[in-house]
Amino acid sequence: MSQGYFSSFNLATHVEDERLHVEQNRSILKQQLKLNDEPAWLNQTHSTFAVNLDKEISRDADAAITSTPGCVAVVLTADCLPVLFTDLEGSVVAVAHAGWRGLLNGVIEATIGKINRPPQQLLCWLGPAISQKNFEVGEEVKQAFADQQIDSQKHFLPGRKGHFQADLYELARDRLKQQQITRIYGGDYCSYGHESLFFSYRRSKKCGRMASMIWIDLT
């Protein structure tokens, strides 16, 4: 229902879109996916806080975990990386919103810790994010990652003077592997480059947000 900058399926209420249009879009989403409950929309702040939707009331977080069938964990993105988790038994699911700040500060590690399962039992899928080709950052970002792990420099290619092209997908894979998660999938899209499929803040500045969701099916 969204128009203009937010056309057509914006699911975020914080981007100056008409509130009614967002609510209509969310209603369509719920109907089309046959969801019993409203997704647990978060108030995202590029933090590393992960909330357990089964126990905690707060929604001020950038990651969510649930073991309740039908409870939908969700994050909103428009270039940042959505990271989705489940265990092999499908007894717990989680999703994290990982921009470069979240990755650097440990949102993936915080989410895995909250899941509370052996890492060997976890599966991970990397949703649509901006690709290295289109993600320019300053030298301070590269240095911040290098200060934590010197090998991370290989995920930054030189660009224009004083800038680098950062690979969010590979930076996330490194973090996951450090946590002993090896079943890692996805990472095949570019939110910036696939203009007909995805919103991109870097491309459009003013735009909507996409939802990446995971839940345990009731059936």
Image (tube, rainbow, N blue to C red):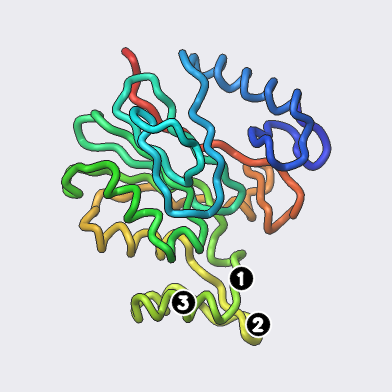
- Given residues 189 and 153, the one toward you in this image is 153
Identify the residue at image location x=34%, y=30%: 55
Q: Which residue is mark 1?
A: 136
Farthest right residue in view: 4
Identify the residue at image location x=30%, y=57%: 176
- Given residues 129 and 77, the one toward you in this image is 77
Q: Amino acid under label 1?
A: Glu
Q: Which mark is residue 65?
A: none
Compared to residue 59, the image places residue 141 above or below, namely below
Q: Is residue 134 left or right of residue 127?
A: right
Q: What separation in Å lies between label 1 and label 3 (alpha carbons)?
A: 15 Å
Label 2 with label 1: CB-CB less than 8 Å: yes
Q: Secondary structure at mark 2?
A: loop
Q: Which residue is mark 3?
A: 144
Compared to residue 189, the image places residue 34 above or below, namely above
Q: Amino acid under label 2?
A: Arg
- Given residues 154 and 99, the one toward you in this image is 99
Query: Which mark lies nearer to you, 1 or 3?
Result: 3
Within-10-Å neighbours for mark 1: few <14, some 14–19, many 20+: many
Q: Amino acid under label 3?
A: Ala
Image location (x, y in percent) of residue 188? 47, 51
Within-10-Å neighbours for mark 3: few <14, some 14–19, many 20+: some
Farthest front residue in view: 57
Q: Earlier in the sequence, mark 2 or mark 3?
A: 3
Image location (x, y in percent) of residue 158? 55, 82
Identify the residue at image location x=59%, y=72%: 137
Q: What separation in Å lies between label 2 and label 1 (alpha carbons)?
A: 9 Å
Compared to residue 83, the image places residue 2 above or below, namely above
Q: Secondary structure at mark 1?
A: strand
The quadrant of the picture occupied by the C terminus is top left
The quadrant of the picture occupied by the N terminus is top right
